[in-house]
Image: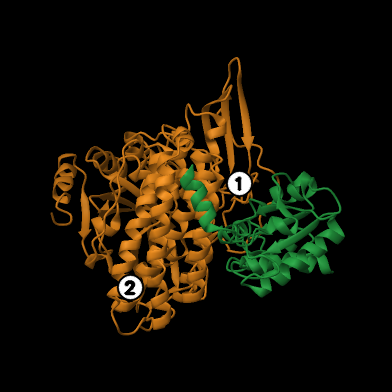
Amino acid sequence: MSHFDWLSELLARYQDEHILVRRGSATALAPAHLLELDPEDWGRAAQVAAGYACRWAGVWAEPRNEDFVITAALAREGDHLLLRTRVPLSAPLLPSHTPYFPGADRMERHAQDMCGLVFSDHPDPRRWSRHNRWAPDSYPLRKDFAVDSAPLPAEPETDYAYIQTQGAGAYEIPVGPVHAGIIEPGHFRFQAVGETVLNLEQRLGYVHKGIEKIAEGRDAAGLAKLAGRISGDSTVHHAWAACMAMERAARLTPPPRAQALRAVLAERERIANHLGDIGAICNDVAFAFAFQQFGRLRELWLRDNAACSGHRLLMDCVIPGGVAADPTPEQIARLRGAVDPLRRELAELYPILDDHPSLEDRLATTGILAPEIAQRLGTVGYVGKASGQDIDLRRDHPYAPYDRLHVTSPLFTTGDVEARLKVRVQEILDALDLLVTLLDTLPGGPVNVPWQAPAGGGEGLGLVEGWRGEILSYVRFGGDGRVTRFFPRDPSWFSWPALEQLIHGNIVPDFPVCNKSVNGSYSGHDL
Amino acid sequence: MLRILNKIWKTGLITEDLPAGADPVLEQVGAQLREGIARQFQGSLAIRQVDAGSCNGCELEIHALNNGYYDIERFGVHFVASPRHADLLLVTGPVSVHMESALRRTWEATPEPRLVVAAGDCAACGGEFGCSYASRGAVSNVLPVDAVIPGCPPSPLKLMQGILQILET
């Protein structure tokens, strides 16, 4: 099977539907293919793609001169297809993709709030990223909006039209934005009868920090630092995705040793987060033993990070052109030496998780995300893999150094909390195997090449398989070598709506464990 | 069950304890922390953590304070779910404008005398995000702050030292 052998069939279907592809390019935003369409065809192009089992993977807009350039990402079999169109700034009207891809809902509303795009047939025109702190007719990502514009006075948001439930015995539980724990802020509105959740509605955007806007004008090094703080738990993967996008824009290839070291950092990040999550999921059903044990393993893992990279969470290790530092032979030996002890620990702990009846009682059949819903929402990562979505970029469209590695990916179809736990359990073992290969076959040579901004500007797309799933990162440089548009799409955009679905019919006290099993990033989503 | 007990027994006590631990700085900081809390808070300091716009890096390290190695509860520090139970607000992140009123209301709900510690570079000075249409930057731009803990993110030990400095002033 070669890449994009499904594309000719989609193009034939577009032709049958009289959808005119103005221009196509396999190189402009490689490895993705780019198709330019008329805005009138925007909605139908999505409709046809939905009928052809494409996954919807993101949309972003950027004002350029008198136009908006809007780009949407679709994916199939590991390949990405970008649809692009233009509408005039004076009449920024476009059909919506949401009727065909429900996962597009919030990102289109984000584009509406940030840019002033109007999606004509969007089923839910409410605001999303705006919380009344900037005026409804001003749009932060437009060029005439100053990055330091004074916000409107701070008031609690009281006019957002939440879904209402009526009927005997039905009641509402509002939760957040400040939650009862050491977690990120967001608002959850439950409607319940007795203990059973009828509906959950999320209101996010509380940690919106203007990342897309403050990225503008940065140089490559500054963007990598910012990307490393989109979601602190994914610092390696977001920085890698952004650097990959910048390097592709600049036609620059990091040296083989840098690529291998990036993967070492990335797999270490995956393991650290999965260890923490396994413990936390168990903790949410009161299995404190596992919480303590996995917390211990995570702490040891982070101490190795600090000893070998200077940073417990590996921040700022990935830089444009490669990685920041070349580990010493002793540091590499320490990283290699950490693999087998962890394997031995897991060999003891995993059977305990497997055989613990009270754990199974709480995790199995709890929070089921049906595979059809997972597919329609475009969920990726462990949420998708637990619900039949067999998607892993490292295997399906490998980027260096995964192109020389054998990557396997777990798959379950039960879609419950237990399945999401099992994906993590297996992914740690798989990542340890990858670490062994990476560290035993580490190429020599330099760990970075000098950054050279693309002369005359340029754009690039970064795609990596983060520990939560696929991260897509788009960067455009202006002629001065500075960023003019940055859009990082965290997989949380798709796992948050999945949480709204999988909680239906569960009891309110199971919400924490359902939430933890999904573990969406608020910061990565709110931007 | 036997396997669990066996694992617990084999793991033993990992907490880096005060008299003979592996990390002399942690021992020292911990002892001072316990002393200060005993003196000023009757042995029990209740912290309400508030993420006011963080990237979640600081939260990961604050979480680590509760793992077996640091086990900050043994020094008298515990994290509480309600600001109404808190002596101290541990605030992270640049204050996003969308969290500004929630942060202020959390502070208002905290009984006096209340302390505010700004944890992490963003909370200390705005960090990578600074001030913008979406961010108020440092926590001190929104609330009176009693102490700051720099770091991106501050390590668990730095967090303990930071909490300590407020007790000594």
Compare marks 2 and 1 and give the one earlier in the sequence.
1
- Is residue A101 visible in the rendered structure shown here? no
Q: Which hue belongs to chain B?
A: green
Q: Is residue A451 left or right of residue B24?
A: left
Q: Chain of mark 2?
A: A
Residue drawn at 27 percent across, 40 percent down: A50
Chain drawn orange, letter? A
Q: Which residue is mark 1?
A: A131
Mark 2 residue type: Leu
Tag 1's secondary structure?
Answer: loop
| Residue A2, numbered circle | none
Q: Is residue A424 left or right of residue A33?
A: right
Q: Which residue is mark 2?
A: A439
- Is residue A429 visible in the rendered structure shown here? yes
**Figure quadrant of residue A241:** bottom left
Q: Chain of mark 1?
A: A
Mark 1 residue type: His
Residue drawn at 28 percent across, 38 percent down: A47
